[in-house]
Image: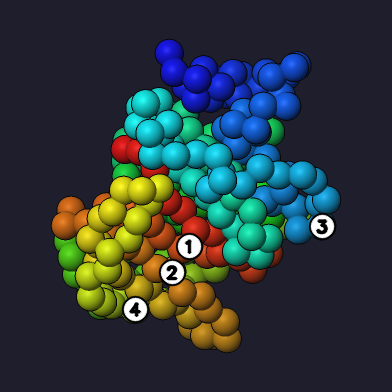
């Protein structure tokens, strides 16, 4: 087992001890507090300063990098479960993302203001089919009183040109897809998601909105 794989395995089990000071272990464990807590004052390890393509390839594990725009901090997550077309990605401290197999964000956990669930069927179909047009979205958030609150969105999906994107030393030519959403029917606020997809509609890189409190996350697939 490679060093990164061993560290990730330890991280998944929430191990602690002397190895906790290892900077690579810090990346693998996610440093979730620094990403999800805007006010947290923690010392984080920048994955971009630690990971390399050689390390990623040697580990050979499905791995994503998640960076929160609001804080500028990043974490790595490993895939912990597959349920039909959904994949669960786990960081340390109980934080997790659920993405569709195309890479569309469906839910978050452990963030404090979680996206509890999302109906993303229209977005998934558009990416997989290379289509543009109008799709609907439904987001479910859980408020402080534990009440589920649903918000419907109407989204316009457009396709741009091809762009050369480099992910830790691995270059890919991907098509940029933009999803511009507004609340339906009021339309008083909205958001914009961006996906950089290959010919199959898989998003190797994306910028996706998780809610008014969490804001937008950049998600990069480091190893598939």
Residue receiving disc 4: 156
Residue receiving disc 3: 39
| Comes first in the chain, label 1 or label 2 | 2
Nearest the camera: 49 or 114? 49
Residue 123, image x, y percentages = 32, 63
- Element type at marker 1? strand
- Element type at marker 2? strand
Residue receiving disc 1: 208
Marks 4/3: CA distance?
A: 34 Å
**Is label 4 or label 2 in front?**
2
Nearest the camera: 13 or 144? 13
Q: Residue at x 16, y 57 (%)?
A: 199
**Is label 2 or label 3 in front?**
3
Quadrant in which residue 178 is drawn: bottom left
Marks 1/2: CA distance?
A: 5 Å
Q: Is 1 situated above or below 54? A: above
Residue 26, image x, y percentages = 65, 33
């Amino acid at each position: 087992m490679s060093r990164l794989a061993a560290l990730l395995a330890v991280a998944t089990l929430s191990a602690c001890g002397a190895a906790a000071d290892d900077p690579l272990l810090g990346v693998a464990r996610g440093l979730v507090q620094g990403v999800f807590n805007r006010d947290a004052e923690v010392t984080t390890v920048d994955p971009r300063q630690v990971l390399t393509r050689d390390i990623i390839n040697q580990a050979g594990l499905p791995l994503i990098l998640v960076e929160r725009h609001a804080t500028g901090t990043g974490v790595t997550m490993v895939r912990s479960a597959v349920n039909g077309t959904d994949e669960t990605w786990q960081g340390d401290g109980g934080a997790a993302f659920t993405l569709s197999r195309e890479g569309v964000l469906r839910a978050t956990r452990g963030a404090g203001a979680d996206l509890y669930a999302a109906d993303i069927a229209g977005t998934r179909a558009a990416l997989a089919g290379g289509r543009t047009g109008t799709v609907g979205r439904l987001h479910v958030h859980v408020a402080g009183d534990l009440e589920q609150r649903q918000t419907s969105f109407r989204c316009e999906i457009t396709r741009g040109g091809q762009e050369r994107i480099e992910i830790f030393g691995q270059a890919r030519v991907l098509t940029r897809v933009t999803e511009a959403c507004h609340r339906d029917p009021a339309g008083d606020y909205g958001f914009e998601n961006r996906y950089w997809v290959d010919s199959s509609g898989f998003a190797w890189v994306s910028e996706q909105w998780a809610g008014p409190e969490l804001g937008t996350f950049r998600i990069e697939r480091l190893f598939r």
